Amino acid sequence: MTSQRTVDVGYTLMCEQSGPRELVRDAEAAERAGFGLAVISDHYFPWLDAQGHAPYAWSVLGAVSQVTERIELMTYVTCPTMRYHPAVVAQKAATMGLLSEGRFTLGLGAGENLNEHVVVPGWPPANVRHEMLEEALEIVTRLFDGGYVTHRGQHFRVDSAKLWDLPERRVPVGVAVSGPQSVAAFAPKADVMIAVEPDAELSSAWDQASPGGPARKVGQLPVSWDRDVEAATARAHEQFRWFAGGWKVNAELPGTSGFEAASRFVRPEDVAAQIPCGTDVGAVVEAVRKFADAGFTDVALVQIGGETQAEFLAAAESDLLPALREELARRPAAVGP
């Protein structure tokens, strides 16, 4: 039997395209516009030089928690295995749980070479990265349980660690997945599924493997909102053509030059075929609907172009969010087996 609910529309704080002060300002504006969730990327590099930014996400999150009151916050996603030790990630997440007064969800993933290579001499294969993420999640979970943790594992060591400041509400944990293997590994251990494609099979498999039944599932959708469709398409092509490579490729490339080379034959029309460009509310509604139909509970919009956030958020408040809510309420998302 299938239960029904509407999908909630969130907003993405894209660290690759905006500086830290701008991201804090945009988070305030997103809450005023009516978004209920803000997810934030955690990058050391932008995908392409044209994006031009990569501030430290956790400092931004701390500031955002103090200038907002209602909007949920979530890392989308943090890699707890290379740049950060899992014990440190657990401490950061617990602190954010307290600063946000229970509004924070820790989103985790196996990482991308683009960001992790700065501290890793060799990029491990995908199966090793998943092993590391499983072990890291075990450490984070034990630290969230309270008390001292000592761990001697294949990839990590922890010596008498303890989180001295834990929030009353345990920080929920989400994990980014892309196929049956990662779903089988993480659905029994995490609270939230994270994925960037509206894959109904992935969603169904997660719910079947989740001990708590149907779970929260958060997707992400890039858009290029602009009254000038040509300008919107050109900006999307300049800053987001890397998106066409897919995550199996994107996780492996080590720097912005690699993404420049890999995307050099991607045309503006190719990008426009994947990303809504312009001010067509119906196109955004249809793209979000695909996630709703696949069983996702949340979709975080990414407005392409750091300098365009104010215009986008104003349009979201007046036109886009009301249209999305009306349409999605008319055709609620399916949740559950």
Image: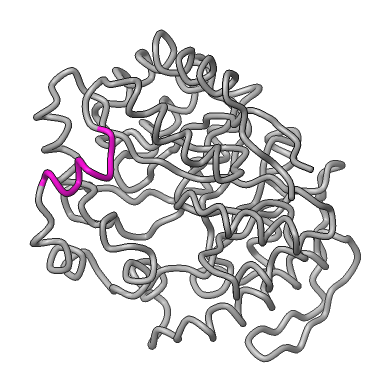
Q: What color scheme is it? A: one colour
In this view of the protein, which residue sits in the foreground, 236 or 62?
236
106 lies above or below 26: below
* Numbered-mark total: 0
304 lies above or below 316: below
Question: Which residue in the rendered view is the most extreme toward the top?
Answer: 318
Magenta stretch: helix, strand or loop mostly? helix
Residue 253 horizontal side relative to residue 218, left or right: left
Question: Which residue in the rendered view is the most extreme toward the bottom?
Answer: 154
In this view of the protein, which residue sits in the foreground, 215 or 56?
215
In this view of the protein, which residue sits in the foreground, 52 or 254?
254
Q: Residue at x 54, y 32 (%)?
A: 64
Image coordinates for residue 224, horizontal then vertical, percent: 26, 32
Question: Which residue in the rendered view is the most extreme toward the front?
Answer: 1
Residue 329 horizontal side relative to residue 310, left or right: right
Image coordinates for residue 150, horizontal then vertical, percent: 82, 80
The range drawn in magenta is 268-276
Q: Residue at x 47, y 68 (%)?
A: 111
Q: Residue at x 31, y 35 (%)?
A: 223
In this view of the protein, which residue sits in the foreground, 113 or 52?
113
Residue 242 horizontal side relative to residue 143, left or right: left
Q: Is residue 334 magenta?
A: no
Image coordinates for residue 146, horizontal then vertical, percent: 89, 61
Image coordinates for residue 194, horizontal then vertical, percent: 57, 53
Q: The N terminus appears in which quarter of the rendering?
A: top right
Question: Which residue in the rendered view is the most extreme toward the right?
Answer: 147
Q: Residue at x 61, y 54 (%)?
A: 203
Question: Residue 201 sits in which quadrant?
Answer: bottom right
318 lies above or below 27: above
Question: Residue 268 sits in which quadrant?
Answer: top left
